[in-house]
Image (spheres, rainbow, N blue to C red):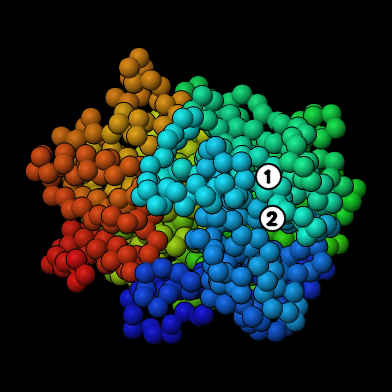
Amino acid sequence: MTPSSNETAPFHGQLAGHARLSDLALAPDGARLVLTVYSVNGEGTGHDATLWEIDPSGQDESRLVARSVEGDFDPAFAADGTLLFLSDRQGPDSAGDDGTGTSLWALSAGGEAKRIARHPGGISAFTVAARADAVAYTAGLLPGTADTESYAAFLRAREDARVTAALYEETTTGVWSAALGPDEPHTFVLRSDGPAVNAGSQGLAGDADVALSPDGSLVAYTRAATGREPDTNTVVVADAATGVRRRAFSRPGHQYYRPAFTADGSTLVCQRQREETYDTEWRVTLVAFDLNSGEETDLLPEFDNWPWPGRAVLSPVPGDSTLWFTGDERGHCPVFRRDTDGTVTRLTASGAYTSLCVTPDGTALYALRSAIDSPPRVVRLEAATPDQQPVFLRAPGALHRLPGTLTEVRTQAEDGFPLRAWLVLPEGASPERPSPLLVVPHGGPQASWSAWTWSWNPWPFAARGYAVLLPDPALSTGYGQRMQERGRGQYGGQPYRDVIALTDAALARADLDATRTALAGWSYGGYLANRAATRTDRFKAIVSAAGMWNLEALQADTDMHAYFRKIFGDPRTRRERYEADSPHVDAARVTTPVLVVHGGRDHRVPMGQALSLHHDLQRLGVPVRFLHFPTEGHTVGAPNHIRVMYETVLNFLDHHVLGREWRRPAML
């Protein structure tokens, strides 16, 4: 379960084969801490999950959960301390499953695992009630099927007829890297004394955003926006015993996510987002819905950053309205505490935190902490101490020595706004031996370089001798609403200028070589790479991964078509932003060699963008290569593909930036 100690393997090979931590869960009495560890499978083509036990005191080594098997993941504890999890494992009642797939299992202390819920097509996610025998899970139903029995029969009929088609009526056809449908996610509530109750549909694009009240009497879930109202979703609160809707909350132009009940069950706390439009910037806050009056209250009216992307954790003590949340802040993603009087306190001095858990008495927190220079590790925090350093617990996932060091670059934009970036320096960088520089803008664009990433990591480049600049330009999160205002409506304007300003500031260092530079980005970063290719010839090479090239075509094809059209306008009547910011308009200006990387199952930035870029550059005689992954989506996830991707990108950079002979990767 720990990474290989083979220091002779390339760093990107070590990275691809490294264990990954996720899904931290704390028992109701605070005595057990369990997480999922994902390790590379035997074929090297994917990851297998197992459950690991972490000592909350930090004294004992971590260990596999007793009687957990390969394929168990997503742990949570029931009110009585029973460990629940999802798994594809087979049980004694497996005969006649008809492709049940992922089921919900229970593992009591000293007992054997028992399947407690299964559903045709599988269960995608679940949550538990803090003080009651109730669990809510998400599973699909086909339109026109009223229950699981008719759904199973419908699935069998479709399979027998070899029908895989889906009919879309109100929503998008895909999300990220997966096609939607034909089944629609529903919320089911299960108690030990009866069959599961269907509490309603989450919409075809539903994402298992579900919460149970502590006493198990209410279930809340979000119902996805539709094509008719693409910028508005609904929070549904239903009776958990009957599925009857009690309340529904929505606001035009806003979407709510990650519901959580207060300890007394009287209030529902949600994240509220207003996405960017042609005239307004993106904004995120936390709100509370009073379930009796329906009144909505903004909990963070003076907080300039966002409680995003994680879920707020509420105090388990009845009558206490304290909550904790995470949010980007100047290259970190700290834990914040909001007290009953509205005071917000930053609890962590550095790092990025996810998977928050609070102890039963509300005095301590457990979390996964990562940083640009550290993969996720399990930590313990005091629940009220400002700017503290965490206590690291013993867990899998520690990484061998990194091939360099981390520092910062700071400068000022032309409008006076302070800018910053992380800078990864390879070993040996000095004024006598200045390193080549690779600039890597992040995706999003509403994002920040604050946490460890597995998909586009700077350290394989550092291991090959490149310094890596990780800029946070306009539209980045963690720098207040002004950062959103600066970039609104100009994807290739102020954000691009900020990237160049930070690049110039970095190259003022004597240990970096301004004559040997490149730029490589993924998603929105890939777009900025394309924009840079049409704006400057200062870089020796450009890598455009899952990047946008033709914005007019993108807004019609992407799974977020309504979102992009809100920002750029209808191209038939408001063409200004398309003409100003779409790189393909300026294709004739590109002279820099380009490597295009794209997945064939990408719904966020469909592969037509890569094909258009590749065709345009070929037609114009620009040196271009296209690395295509037919089975990958918006990111490259398979370990064997990760190795091929890094090797191709590194060889491309070595050839064009360092002047080395081109080496075609062996597997290509």
Image coords of residue 234 (percent x, y)? 64, 33
In this image, 2 relative to 126: left or right? left
Q: What x and y, as percent, mark residue 163?
A: 37, 46
Q: Amino acid at mark 2?
A: Thr
Q: Is residue 325 in view?
A: no
Judging depth in this view, the residue of 139 and 234 nearest the camera is 139
Q: Is residue 404 left or right of residue 362?
A: left
Q: Nearer the viewer, residue 213 or 380?
A: 213
Q: In the image, which disc is placed on residue 198? A: 1
Residue 59 seen in the figure: yes
**Left or right: residue 221 compared with residue 94:** right
Q: Position of residue 294 (x, y in %)?
A: 80, 29
The residues bearing labels 2 and 1 have C-alpha atoms spaced at a distance of: 15 Å
Residue annotated with mark 2? 127
- Which three-letter amino acid code belongs to the residue tagged 1? Asn
Q: Along the line of sight, which residue is nearer the eye, 352 or 109?
A: 109
